[in-house]
Image: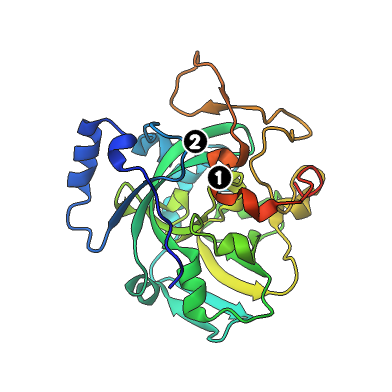
Amino acid sequence: MAHRWKNDLSERDVTPEGAWLTRRGLMAGAGGLALAGLAGRAGAAEGLEPNTWEEITTYNNFYEFGTDKADPAQHAGAMTVSPWSVRIDGLVDRPADYALEDILSRMTIEERIYRFRCVEAWSRVVPWNGFELADLLQMAGVQNDARYVAFETHLNRDEMPGVRFPVLDWPYVEGLRLDEAMHPLTIMATGLYGRDLPNQNGAPLRLVVPWKYGFKSIKSVVRITLTAEEPPTSWNKANPREYGFYSNVNPEVDHPRWSQATERRIGAGIFARREPTLMFNGYADEVGDLYAGMDLTRFF
């Protein structure tokens, strides 16, 4: 198993006690659930209260179901999420189609409360349930030549009205460098607030990489491929000038069409002041070393 992520905060640092007790009651009986708080120390969303279930599940980008923020909640219920399997292949020792039930029986499910920053300059705080991606990759056996991890989203044209339009080259694909994928902050999410992950949020299994813009956290994953070469990614293929492979949250590197220096917190109200965006979304202490010596204006 991978080296587990350690944290110096508890949930009492994140939410008022009443909300904390309510969530403890909600998650009672969730076998094996290990509680964890916000990642990191300075700047890592310490003390921020998570967004509500409604805010998290009704305002989404999932273009397979439409380009409006309300479309996924309206249409994603049609997606079949059981049975589900994930093909793990490429440079691994044990390539196979792994049933989700088998995967979950071998993983340690935790709660991770993370900042979430969209490239569109809105943000929220999400209480995910999931397991470290590193544990899944080690289960399949990472070979020495592997340098990158490629991901692919489920595609069903009968259930996904958005794929009738050439917004992107379907299916949706994403990728990480291997050290990013193996980092303890990188998880495969299976739920929210102790409940199963809703379809519109990427059920039944999605990637979460909290220091990168949200589109890197690919939803409804059906394939994971270990490779020696940098894999193609959907938004980079569609517009490489605007969307780089790394897509780390960086307030000093603007999107060509808007500033990334500030963000709008979902649920804060229309008159709320925009908040300053933190380097690596507040996780610089944890992940900054991954990019030591790199020109982040070039490798954006």
Along the line of sight, the residue nearer the viewer: 259 or 68: 259
Left or right placement of residue 221 versus residue 19 in this view: right
Left or right placement of residue 220 versus residue 120 in this view: left
Quadrant containing the N terminus is: bottom left
Examine the rendering and report whether any part of residue 117 can be seen: no
User: Farthest residue toward the top?
Assistant: 271
Look at 70% across and 58% down and name the residue there.
233
Mark 1 and mark 2 residues within 8 Å of each other at the beta carbon: yes
Indicate the position of residue 213 as horizontal and vertical percent values.
61, 44
Look at 61% across and 63% down and name the residue there.
179
Crowd band around label 1 with a 10 angstrom C-alpha radius: few (<14), some (14–19), many (20+): some
Q: Mark 1 sits on what residue?
A: 285
Indicate the position of residue 286 as horizontal and vertical percent values.
54, 49
Indicate the position of residue 201 as horizontal and vertical percent values.
46, 49
Indicate the position of residue 99 as horizontal and vertical percent values.
41, 77
Q: Quadrant of residue 81?
A: bottom left
How many discs mark residues in the rendered view?
A: 2
Query: Considering only order in the chain, which callout, 2 or 1, is on the residue closer to the N terminus?
Result: 2
Q: Amino acid at mark 2?
A: Ala
For mark 1, give the secondary structure. helix
Crowd band around label 2 with a 10 angstrom C-alpha radius: few (<14), some (14–19), many (20+): few
Q: Amino acid at mark 1?
A: Asp
For mark 2, give the secondary structure. loop
Examine the rendering and report whether any part of residue 129 can be seen: yes
Q: Mark 2 sits on what residue?
A: 42
Q: Quadrant of residue 182?
A: bottom right
Look at 65% across and 55% down and name the residue there.
290
